[in-house]
């Protein structure tokens, strides 16, 4: 169960970033009480071909977030979700990368990257 307050132990990678790709995602099971939550993601990205990487967040298979990460250095992006239930529920939280890209152009590699350091789950009042 998540008490009110800040939880920082879900997919924490210390001082290292995990590089996501389109075929890979980080996921974990989280038990939520009914209510509102802020999910914050510490991310960084590298654009390619004029596009920044796109962070995706799914909760039990439902897309909750799809937004570009327009920062080469670590930054936070956050979403607010509502858990509407009359009981505590375990949900599958999946963090992914929608537009991975790699190519060799004119003899040099072009690589769009998305890096994730941590996910913070905060129950809101």
Image (cartoon, grey):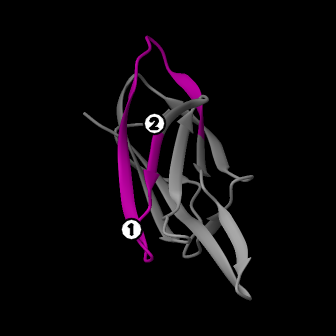
Q: Main SS of the magenta segment?
A: strand
Q: Is residue 10 one of those drawn in magenta?
A: no
Q: Position of residue 39 (x, y in %)?
A: 41, 45
- SS assignment at label 2: loop
Report the residue marked by disc 2: 2
Q: Splitting the image into 4 quarters, where does residue 107 fall?
A: bottom right
Write the start and end of the magenta stretch as one range. Answer: 65-93
Q: Is residue 36 left or right of residue 121?
A: left
Q: Is residue 87 one of those drawn in magenta?
A: yes
Residue shown at 37% from the left, 44% from the top: 79
Q: Which mark is residue 75?
A: 1
Q: Is residue 67 left or right of residue 98?
A: left
Residue shown at 52% from the left, 43% from the top: 57
Residue shown at 65% from the left, 45% from the top: 27
Q: Position of residue 37 (x, y in %)?
A: 36, 36
Between residue 20 and residue 100, name the one nearer to us.
100
The mark closer to the camera, 2 or 1, is 1
């Amino acid at each position: 169960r998540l008490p009110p307050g800040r939880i920082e132990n879900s997919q924490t990678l210390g001082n290292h970033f995990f590089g996501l790709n389109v075929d890979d995602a980080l996921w974990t099971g989280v038990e939520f009480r009914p209510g509102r939550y802020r999910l914050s993601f510490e991310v960084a990205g590298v654009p390619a071909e004029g596009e920044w990487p796109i962070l995706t967040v799914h909760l039990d298979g439902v897309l909750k977030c799809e937004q570009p990460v327009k920062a080469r250095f670590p930054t936070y992006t956050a979403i607010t979700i509502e858990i509407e239930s009359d009981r505590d529920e375990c949900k599958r939280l999946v963090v992914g990368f929608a537009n991975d890209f790699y190519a060799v152009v004119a003899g040099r590699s072009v690589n769009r990257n998305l890096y994730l350091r941590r996910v913070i789950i905060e129950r809101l009042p």
